[in-house]
Image (cartoon, coloured by chain):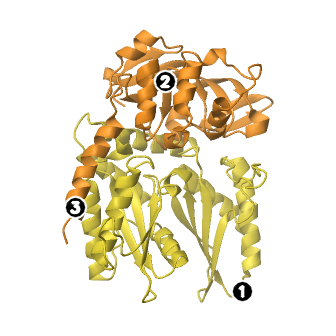
Amino acid sequence: MNNKKAIKIETPLTEEIVRALRVGQNVLISGTIFTARDKVHAYLAGSPDPEDMPFKKLAGSILYHCGPVITEDNGRYSVIAAGPTTSQRMQMYEPFVISHYGVRGIMGKGGMSAEVAQAMKESGCVYLHAIGGAGALLAEKIKAVEGVWKLEEFGRAEAMWALRVEDFPAMVTIDSRGESIHAQVEKTSKERLLGLIQGR
Amino acid sequence: MLRLKDGIKEIIRKTAVSLPRDVEEALKAAFEAEPEESPSKEALAQMLENARIAKNSARPLCQDTGTPIFYARVPRELSFAVVEKSILDGLRTATESVPLRPNAVDVLTEKNSGDNTGLFFPEIYFEQSEQDTLVVDLSLKGAGSENAGAFYKLPDERLKAGRDLDGVRKCILDAVYSIQGRACPPYTVGVGIAGTRLAAAKLSRTALMRKLNEEAPEPAINELEKRALSEINSLGIGAMGLGGNCTALGVKINHAHRHTGSYFVDISIACWANRRSRLVW
């Protein structure tokens, strides 16, 4: 990561800060972020028990599509590897989750759909792209486990972990104007694909 | 004497925490070739840095430590059952000691078994060998890349792909285009051509076990592998799909005789890490 040019941001994020971010910018995130993958998303988009989780903390927060490797020793958790998982699987839930909980950042890998980009535009949220497979490097940016929710029910990979991070590197690849690097790359590659498979 | 289950545990650890040498070299070459300050170069830099940290701190490269897939070639003196037991024992121990992420989930109860074993989990394939040594090849196959696999029946009207190697080429390009950056490129692309679905799938998966510099013996396949690789890299998807010149590190094609009425093409994708290694016992 080209840290010299990276913008430092801290959670909870304000709408103003998020709206100023642009695709292609590198960021270094500090503060608390929450892991949320398949099971947590299905739960959040269903009818969750309002007494059951850190609802209020999600406003202004970053949801991280990640199922970490975490070990436990006498109630102390250590994060061993914690890279992003493929965000596409959370697409059908994300527009609701963004608008309902006031989440300001979604972090994962591979990008998300035009519907999610539209929800980000409406609510003031960005997509943050972390490097897939960089589990060991990214775990070093996680300084503490602040809490865990739904551990018994969903298991370690699917539970929601509150993680304190310091200078966690990511790139803005969908911004709050709805601009998306993923959509641009897909468009260009489609033109090239058609050139390569047409004819014969 | 080291026990077989300890050898299995050790090969799992090695596969989870370090890149195969050919893969690391290919990533370095890709990093050198990408333009300064491009998102693709930065993604490759993080991958290489991650590999260094994982190796030095003996922790997994990726939190998805994958579906363990074992290919065992067993000498006559050893029974498949003994090898299977050692694999399961070694895997259970490695899940604790490396550690691996427990990934095996019961489809009926949705419960995670907690130790990476369950019905058909891990996958183990046996072959009888005429050699004196046991050879176990291991692949730790992440879900992101496994989810990206694709399957084609030729002819394919949408792609205008006929029943020939040019049709296969169109399938390969379409598969990579369709997954974009979602399965952690630069990919290794495994291709299986066969007349049954099972054979095509098995061939595409075992193709990922070939070293990147291992050339296909048949000139027509060799040529197709090279052409497909160069065309994939011209799509501009790049490392992690952020745009760039390196979308794949290699294309590896396996083929079987097909039934005259069937022509299947299966595509297996490995992420940039393509974690694989071999134990010779």
Name the element at disc 2: strand
Q: Are marks 2 and 3 in contact (CB under 8 Å)?
A: no
State the count of labels: 3
Is B6 located above or below residue A176 in the figure? below
x then y, percent, for residue B117: 74, 59
Residue A114 in view:
yes
Q: CA distance from mark 1 to mark 2?
A: 58 Å
For residue A98, side relative to residue B85 (left or right): left
Q: Chain of mark 3?
A: A
Q: Which tint was used for chain A?
A: orange
Question: Which lettered chain is shown in yellow?
Answer: B
Name the element at disc 3: helix
Q: CA distance from mark 2 to mark 3?
A: 37 Å
| Residue positioned 36% across, 57% down in the render | B176
Q: Quadrant of the C terminus of chain A?
A: bottom left
Mark 2 packing: few (<14 Cα in 10 Å), some, or many (20+)? many
For residue B90, side relative to residue B227 (left or right): right
Q: Chain of mark 1?
A: B
Q: Quadrant of residue A101?
A: top right
User: Where residue B160 is drawn, which disc sits there?
Assistant: none
Q: Quadrant of the N terminus of chain A?
A: top left
Residue receiving disc 3: A196
Is B129 located above or below residue B244 in the figure? below
Mark 3 packing: few (<14 Cα in 10 Å), some, or many (20+)? some
| Residue positioned 69% across, 62% down in the render | B121
Residue receiving disc 1: B77
x then y, percent, for residue B114: 76, 49
Q: Mark 2 is on which residue type?
A: Gly
Can you name the residue that lies furthest to the front here?
Answer: B157
Residue receiving disc 2: A105
Q: Mark 3 is on which residue type?
A: Leu
